[in-house]
Image (cartoon, rainbow, N blue to C red):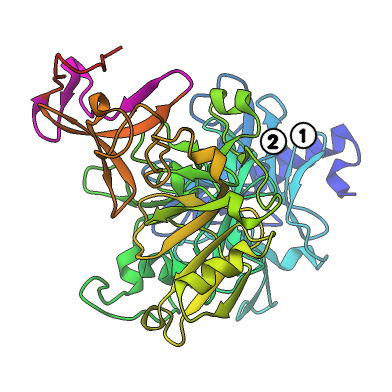
Amino acid sequence: MISWSVNHMLFISLFHSVFLYTSFMCSLAKDTITYNSLLSDEKRDSLVSAGEVFELGFFTPNGSFDNRRYVGIWYYKSRTVVWVANRDKPLSASSGGVLAISDNGNLEVLDRTGKSYWSTNVPGSIRMSRAAKLMDTGNLVLSNEDPEGNSMTIQWQSFENPTDTFLPGMMLDENLVLTSWKSSDDPGSGNFTFQQDQERTNQVIILKRSVKYWNSGVSGRFISLNEMPPAILYLLSNFTSKTVRNNSVPYLTSSLYNHTRLVMSISGQIQYLRWDSQMVWSPIWAEPRDKCSVYNACGNFGSCNSKNNLVCKCLPGFKPISPDDWISGDYSGGCVRKTTTCRNNSMVDTFLDLKMMKVGNPDSQFNAKSETECKIECLNNCQCQAYLFEEAEMSQGSSACWIWSEELNNLQEEYATDRNLHVRVAVSDIELTARSCEACGTNLIPYPLSIGPNCGDPLYYSFHCNNSDGQVGFETPSGTFRVTSINPDTRTFFIRIKDDDNCKNSDNGKFLKLNQSWPQHKI
């Protein structure tokens, strides 16, 4: 127990005596707290770093209408908060909060009764040798000084105990975690965390509570990518990582990172920001950058396309596990097969041919001489959900057949890849009638719609399948419009028009016009 918190009267007595005794000392050392000095909320005390870059003190979040008080660090000029001590245990404005070094040598946030709201929780030491200093980097350092003042030993620092912000000079390691605020006016621990991926080397991850929300890349023989720019990796390594220089990657130095910060936002984005000449924080980079960048955004067997109004849809031959959730916009439950595959023989199954499709890593791989051999292997294995064949020159060795035995996840359309994914489906689920057209990528073409002269109803032959990316276009007298979804149950389809006013297509500057002889009509 702290001696000056044994009882209420003793605390108040020492509080005032210490404050009066040290008031002249604080004017000489505005960036440091010692055992003989403290910060008082009632006195509006604060620390300011030597170069007036950062300030530490008591604050109430912008937009908050209650009397919650926190101890935090913010930029001296912009007042942007970068660290909060008692984020999950606020004081009240009337509690008489102080920040002080206690008898056990810890830096603590206390109220006037001596109740602790936050502590550095480091091993005890001779309190007289402890000091807490606010640096121009934004780091708050608690250290021991030798009696002669020639050296100091760091006991604790805010750079190793961050809240939601990563500042230049910090180092991302296996112990460092950024946790978002609960809301814009509540710095309490929120839903999103940013940290190293403990399962994969050289990768970072965002978790939503305990569920993977985004990861920086994938490592493996099938696919290896990293969504982290070299400049961000350089920052996270405290300017120690090696980058490959080319025309798009300039020579990186720590001076390029002045007035920048990396923030785990309340929206789930990790954001890199720079204080610009207009005196505002400008976004430079962020992930996940769109809805499809979220890990497995549409659930298993759900395909994501951020260019569509409805970004998620089930693959042809699949249906939402929870239709009500999908209607409400929650696609995380994914999709399930309409009909069980591999029922009596392999002849009842076929494959969707999906172009430019991103997918999670496969479960197995073997050398195959041809795509036919790869396809037969999948058909003969009832556990096989999908396959992908790579020619020798693509796989940098012998030709490879990749097999997915588990449910497909992280599917994303129009991804920059030359690989074609073949997904196993029941024939009955995609060949709805004898005259139905074949599926175009992830789009089922139900009768009477037609994408060719030999299928569908000729009256509906106004659709086009782009075989390079598996997307469907609707051809009109005023141009071709992208089909974002087709619903055979309601006999409707949706097209993408960027400018909703007057049904104008901003891509070509023309208005949507339908041929009066066509059976289709706008609703």
Relative to residue 224, is residue 35 depicted above or below?
above
- Disc 1/disc 2 C-alpha distance (Å): 6 Å
Front-most of 123 and 19?
Answer: 123
Q: What residue type is labelled 1?
A: Arg
Q: Can residue 222 be seen in this view?
A: no
Front one among 47 and 179 = 179
Give the amino acid at mark 2: Gly
Mark 1, residue position: 112
| Residue 451 found in image quarter | top left
* Count of numbered marks: 2
Which residue is label 2 attached to?
A: 97
Residue at the spot 82% in from the left edge and 56% down from the top edge: 103
Pick the quarter of the image with the C terminus: top left
Residue 94 placement (x, y as % from top left): 69, 24
Q: Residue 380: x, y in percent?
A: 65, 65
Q: How many residues crowd around disc 2 within 10 Å: few (fewer than 14), some, or many (20 or more)?
A: many
The part of the chain drawn in magenta is 489-510
Residue 138, given in percent of the width and then of the height, sits at 49, 57
Q: Do the residues labelled 1 and 2 touch (CB within 8 Å)?
A: yes
Q: In this view, does 187 lie above or below 271?
A: above
Q: Observer-nearest residue: 104 or 256?
A: 256
